[in-house]
Amino acid sequence: MPPPIVEFVNVTKSFGNRRVLDDVSFRIDAGRSVCILGRSGTGKSVALKHVVGLMAPDSGRVLVDGEDLARLDSRDRSRVRRRIGFVFQNAALFDSIGVGQNVEFPMRRHTTLSDGEIRSRARELLAQVGLERDYEKMPADLSGGMRKRAALARAMALDPEILLADEPSAGLDPITAGEIDALLVALRDRSRTTLLVVTHNIPSARAIGDELIFLHDGRIIARDAPAALAASDIPLVRAFMSSEGGG
Amino acid sequence: MRFLSSVGDSAQFAGRVIVEAVRPPYEVREIARQLFELGCRSVPLIAASGFAVGIVLSMHTRASLARFGAEALIPAGLALALVRETGPLTAGLLLSGRIGAGIGAELGAMKVTEQIDALEAIAVDSFRYLVVTRVVACVIALPILTSVMNFMGILGGFTAEATITGMPFRTYFRMAFSSIQFSDLIPATLKTAVFGFIIATASSYLGMHATRGTEGVGQASTRSVVSSSILLIAANVLLVRLIFFLYPG
């Protein structure tokens, strides 16, 4: 049986006196889409950053396809990271280069594609997220939602096996949020990409997630399919699932 | 205690720069880009400042040497003063402001907007791509920019002298350069490579450790200028001592 593509094993992480992740363990199989939900400040984004090795646990292990990023050397860590796409909460586009160049960047660094092929692929990715006319623009010229979409295009540039998205629809209008959700679902269905999405937008979570994980005070308090969680006997989970807001 | 911790931290950072700078693969394209941004774009400032410094230095030199009836030594005196100390130190301090503030602000802004994390997530070594490239570019650029400053300073001196005495260009430059020896020019110019290392490393360290949003970026920028200026002045004392030890004449 293949190992889970992402696995947290007794992960604990603190910042000063504040324990953000408290003995968290879970497994995600390849091709699944899982949403991590919880109130603001419960460690959702911190959990996501552990998967790509931007943070290391104080104790426990985070494994990507059986490999512990915290224990890999820089070359092997780079190899694993190339399999992962990350959409940051605030997009984190490189603001000194254009939108098109942002999407080209991972391909220029890690592929042997020609200039023309890279540009063509970047345009194709931007078209998929509805930004085909914004290739030459600078990130500062884009709205928040457009920056998020450009960041998603960049995250997909290397055809990642795992896509991590930190609040992809936060701050977006419902229609644009729905378009982002549809993009993520299409990615999962078309390429069998494993999705791990942090959100507190319940409609998005229902649309994207095969399963939802609830974090509260650094611990997992529930994990199940959206429909099952709607009938959870945990009041916080029920309250979350019955809300239509968030984002 | 906190101060000692950050001194240790920054020393470790500087050591890592040296190790990573000599280890392949090299970010040649990015180094070239930084050389243009940090080096070429500094030429107007350095050239204009050098010219102005040359004029002022010439006026002061004339005022001092006229007391002894030694006006004929003005070109040589000016050239020696510029090449041995005024040019390198002035270039270093000017560039600690222009380059230091720029690097501190740019990397600080990247830090607080998660662009550095984004680089790491795209499997790019942010230290080599952002820090090492800037340090290498500055180490290369500073001696070149110092030479520009020295030349423009001598040109400024000529302009001041020609205005007063009508001395021909060729005569002035022959008199100026005849006094300059290898031990005057090369060590003093090459010491600015150390200045480049200090400016880029200090400001990169402060930028990469910026916190607290726009306030933090502003602090990183300001501290970059102050720290690199102080470190540069202190290093200059040691380097001048070393130069005099190696070239006592």
Image (cartoon, rainbow, N blue to C red):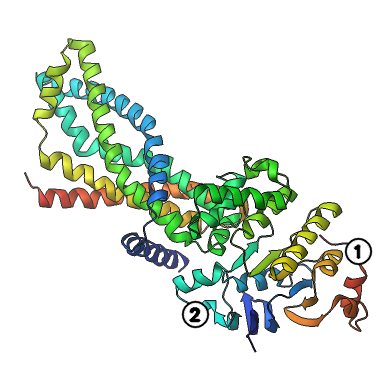
Name the quadrant of the C terminus of chain A. Answer: bottom right
* Image: B149 above or below A108: above
Image-based side of B127 in relation to A207, left or right: left
| Chain to which mark 1 belongs | A
Q: What secondary structure is marked by label 1?
A: loop
Mark 1 neighbour class, 10 Å CA radius: few under 14, some 14 to 19, many 20 or more: few
| Residue farthest along the left direction in this orientation | B249
Residue drawn at (77%, 57%) of the image: A180
Residue drawn at (49%, 51%) of the image: A114
Residue B103 visible, this orientation: yes
The amino acid beneath tag 1 is: Glu
- Name the spot of residue B208 as percent of width and height, x first: 50, 57
Residue identifier under label 1: A244
Residue identifier under label 2: A71
Q: What secondary structure is marked by label 2?
A: helix
Mark 2 neighbour class, 10 Å CA radius: few under 14, some 14 to 19, many 20 or more: few
